[in-house]
Structure formats: C-alpha cells, structure tokens
Amino acid sequence: MINLKKNTSIVRSSEPIGLVGGGQIGPDDLNQLLIRVKTVVAADGGAASLMESGRVPDAVIGDFDSLRAEHRDQIPADRLFPIPEQNSTDFDKALRNVDAPLVLGAGFLGGRLDHQLAVLNVLARWPDRPCILLGAHEVVFLAPPRIALKVTPGDVVSLFPFQRVKGRSLGLEWPIDGLVMEPNGGVGTSNRALADVELFIDGPGLLVMVPRYALDQVMQAFLSEQTGRWPAREE
C-alpha cells in the first residue's frame, strides 16, 4: 500500500517487500527477489533494472539523480517519491520510508567498497526496518534481539559489529558467550555452524552473514513470531 500522509512511511505492507538499488545485480538476483515478494520498491536508479526486466516498480524513492528520463517517463507520477536532500544515500531514503515485516534488497552489495560500507552503515542505523541484503555469495542482515537460523552444519556464519554489542549463541563452533564485539575490537568473521544456530544480542549493531542459499531460512526466521524486533530509532 502506498501511503501519501505526511510523517508516515511512503510504502506500507503487511507482507515482505522487495527493494532494488542501482548497484551490481547478479544474473538471478531480480528473479530471486521477485518470486518472494508482491510489492517492489526502487531506490532511485534501481528502477532501471526493474523496468528492463519488464516490472514497473510500485514506488521509486530517492533523490533521482540517477533515474534516467527514459525510465522515469514510463512510471506513473503517483509512484515517484523524490527526496532531494543530499545528506543520505538512496538506500537510506528508501529503507527509512518503507514499513513492512521484512525488506529483501538486491543491487546494494558488490561494486565499490565505499558504497558497500555506506549500505552496511545504513543497515545498522535502522534496526526497526528488518532487511536482508542479497549478495553474490551471502545474505547480510542486522541481527534482531533473538533469531534462530536453520542452517547446514559447516556453513560459515560471520558476525561483524558496527557498534559495541554482547550476546550469546547456540550452535556455533566458537560461541560468542561473554565476548564483547566492537568495530575496533573483537569481531566474529568465519565462524561456523555446528547445527542450527540461535543468537541472542543485547543491542542493535551486529551484522550477520550466512551463505546465499540460506535466504529462505533467514526469511522464515525473521517472519517467525519468536523473532524479536528492535524499537524504532530516535531521530
């Protein structure tokens, strides 16, 4: 549902939505996204990939500096939501203006390292907007307070903190119980699953990376009633 009221999210849905960026998109990324969602939003230039695949985005959000006229002219005006301020990325503008139980994003990872870091920074700064990003080899998400992941023994489970966090784990080869993780301190890259993994985190800020083929299991975990959700960030 598109919401035109002021001070509310632009797009609201009771089901997961897709979000497409203008970065690198793998040959099967759009298909993997579109078969899992009904509503799809483009972050500025991400509209191009959707239009060229034959799908008109339900909404386009961004500063429109990379939305080409040939695509913009084919999108109904009531689906265009320009946000001209330049103090945030298009991913930031889009993510903070959608409200759904889960956002599945493609076209945000890969390419320039500074762009990827900016995307991960945004992911960590909007903890009340559950979002899974599809990468070439992995999926990335911000850990909620509690999440249970059905993964395959031996799967890589990497944990990277964007701020100081503590927690505990079940099913990891190297448990995180009692550890303090922070960007300039201890991190948890290349941990491995011994069985299904369960994480309990004391605050928002921990990014989790698992193999791409675990996408459906991660989506299921986020949509489970037992998975927590961080409160809205105060502006």
Image: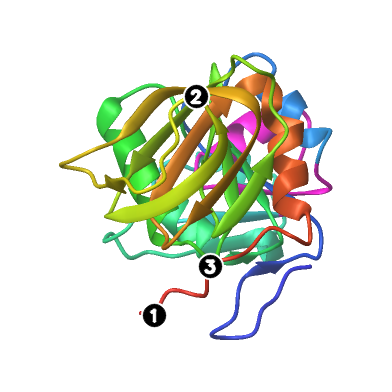
Residue bounds of the magenta highlight: 37-58
Whether 48 is among the magenta residues is: yes
Q: Indicate the secondary structure of the residue bearing disc 3.
A: loop
Task: Indicate the quadrant where residue 27 lies.
Answer: top right
Q: Nearer the viewer, mark 2 or mark 1?
A: 2
Q: Identify which amino acid the numbered label 1 is placed on.
A: Glu
Q: CA distance from mark 2 to mark 3?
A: 27 Å
Q: Residue furthest front?
A: 178
The reply to whether callout 1 and callout 3 are in contact (CB within 8 Å) is no
Q: Position of residue 80 (x, y in %)?
A: 61, 60
- Residue matched to label 2: 173
Whether 187 is among the magenta residues is: no
Task: Give the vertical position of 118 relative to 78 (above or below).
Answer: above
Residue 126 in view here:
yes
Q: Nearer the viewer, mark 1 or mark 3?
A: 3
Task: Give the side of residue 202 with respect to residue 156, left or right.
Answer: left
The reply to whether callout 2 and callout 1 are in contact (CB within 8 Å) is no
Residue in the foreground of this view, choosing between 146 and 72: 146
Task: Give the side of residue 66 with respect to residue 98, left or right.
Answer: left
Query: Looking at the rendered structure, which numbered label has been put on residue 234?
Result: 1
Quadrant in which the C terminus appears: bottom left
Q: Residue furthest bottom?
A: 6
Task: Give the vertical position of 66 relative to 195 (above or below).
Answer: below
